[in-house]
Amino acid sequence: MGWITRAEYADGMSFDVELQGHRFTIDADEQFGGQNKGPRPKALLLSGLAGCTAMDVVSILTKMKMPYDSFAVEVDADMTDEHPKVYSDIRVRYVFTGADLDRSKIEKAVKLSEERYCGASAMLGKSARITSEIVTNAS
């Protein structure tokens, strides 16, 4: 069985990561000896959540034939003060623009992603409270 990802030490606190044939660098904050050569490993979990739920929502809305002009998922989180520092509260914002947005279809797609399909949400939800909001046309 092959590995999904591999992190190889580069220097300081940075590592060169290979993930499914893609390469990038991760690093620590400067206050912890990093040189800001790449994202922090824990923050990548939030990017994974954003991507996971975004892909679900796009897939579901495509099946529902609901058009939109733009769509983004924004994620923010609070961390515990005690070690190991973990995310305690995660906020997910689904942002849509478009002339023919159907709020009920968007809500259904988001709910299906959050409650049924997004594995990242299911995993992170075991240790953090995840809340979400839907914003349409900057409302």
Image (cartoon, rainbow, N blue to C red):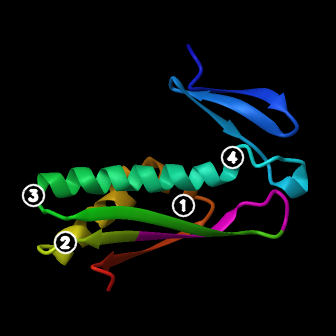
Residue 28 in the figure: left or right of residue 102? right
Badge 1 is on which residue? 125
Badge 4 is on which residue? 41
Residue 130 in the figure: left or right of residue 73? right
Badge 2 is on which residue? 98
Find residue 2 and report its image quarter: top right
Residue 91 falls inside the magenta stretch = yes
User: In this rendering, is residue 73 above or below 51?
Assistant: below
Residue 130 in the figure: left or right of residue 136? right
| Amino acid residing under circle 3 | Lys
Q: Which of 87 and 135 is in front in this view?
A: 135
Q: Residue at x 20, y 76 (%)?
A: 103
Give the spatial CA distance, label 4 vs label 1: 18 Å
Residue 93 in the figure: left or right of residue 88? left
| Amino acid residing under circle 1 | Gly
**Element carrying mark 1:** loop
Give the spatial CA distance, label 2 vs label 3: 13 Å
**Element carrying mark 4:** helix
Give the spatial CA distance, label 3 vs label 4: 36 Å
Which numbered disc flags the more N-terminal residue, 4 or 1? 4
Q: State which quarter of the image contains the C terminus.
A: bottom left
Badge 3 is on which residue? 65
Chain part drawn in magenta: 82-93
Residue 48 visible in the shown view:
yes
Q: Which mark is residue 61?
A: none
Q: Residue furthest top?
A: 1
**Element carrying mark 3:** loop
Q: How many labels does the image show?
A: 4
Q: Residue at x 18, y 75 (%)?
A: 104
